[in-house]
Amino acid sequence: MLKQRILTSAVLAPLALLLVFYTPLAQFSFIAGLIVLLGAWEWSAFMGLQTKRARGGYTLLVAAILGALHLHWPIERLWLDNGTLIADANYVFTLAFAWWLVATFLIVKYPRMSSAWSEGLVLRAVAGFLTLVPLWLALNTLRSAHFAEQHHYGSTLIMVVLGIVWSADIGAYFTGKNFGKRKLMPRVSPNKTIEGLLGGLATAVVFVIVFCHFAEVPVSQWAIYGLLTVFIALFSAIGDLLESMFKREVGLKDSGACLPGHGGILDRIDSLTAAAPIFALFYAWTVAL
């Protein structure tokens, strides 16, 4: 298993860098959409759909939503000439933020509240829309930021949010393994601990402070960036827990099997589904100030 994980990561890492840094905007948006659609296919299993026709139907519905949003918000037009994000895209991120607050409530109350959504096909479908669609828009928003002035500026933003997610995950793993005693959400994800969560948050903050140092961000701004990092990393953990909750409800160990040693696409991007839209929202607010 470990060998498979290493080999898969060795292939995925350079592909991810090529996608983030060297893919033209239109192609980036298209590939990001394909990744989200793979996630939609896996999410359909969380809904209890079993036939390929039913799962394909849900995936096509998500594709239709992405297509409509692409026509309304081409990646090249997400930012206005004054450098601010178009208003209605901000509304989507605000809606996503509200959804993740609701998701947090559902996770905390699991399994007591599961009866309110586990039997409702429409509710689980909407949960998938709110989890996956804002991720696509967030990736497009970050990638296209200041693109005319500096092609790789948005790529750096994406790498920052990925760094927050990855450092929080790594920090949580090692802290939880060595010091974890108190369970975080045992009914959702038995292996996660409060100590692991705190270690992950601290590691993410260290990552961002180091980035601020090398990016020559004024020291006076480090505290606010550190605070925002705690918030983003906390919701990245919520994204992970949400997927765990849905998998537990339908009796799945992994969301899929397309990534040897890693499981499915959702198993890799679950934290990002929450972190990226909230990061994009904070970034857009910061730019508008």
Image (spheres, rainbow, N blue to C red):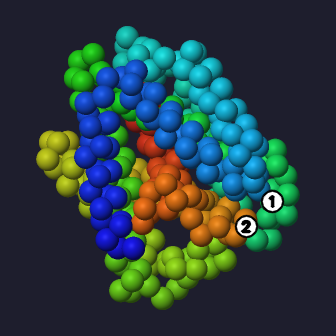
Instruction: Look at the image and tell me in which quarter the C terminus lies.
Output: top left
Name the spot of residue 23 as percent of width and height, x first.
30, 28
Instruction: Look at the image and tell me in which quarter the N terminus lies.
Output: bottom left
Left or right relative to 79: residue 39 = right
* Residue of label 2: 249
* Residue of label 1: 118
Callout 2: few (<14), some (14-19), or many (20+) C-alpha neighbours within 10 Å?
A: some
Name the spot of residue 138 as percent of width and height, x first.
47, 35
Q: Earlier in the sequence, mark 2 or mark 1?
A: 1
Amino acid tagged 2: Glu
Choose between 167 and 257: the one closer to the eye. 257
The total of numbered circles placed on residues is: 2
Choose between 44 and 196: the one closer to the eye. 44
Amino acid tagged 1: Ser
Marks 2 and 1: CB-CB under 8 Å? yes
Q: Element at badge 1?
A: loop
Name the spot of residue 39 as percent of width and height, x first.
56, 46
Left or right relative to 167: residue 84 = right
Left or right relative to 103: residue 216 = left
Choose between 257 and 140: the one closer to the eye. 257
- Residue at image point 37% right, 11% down: 81
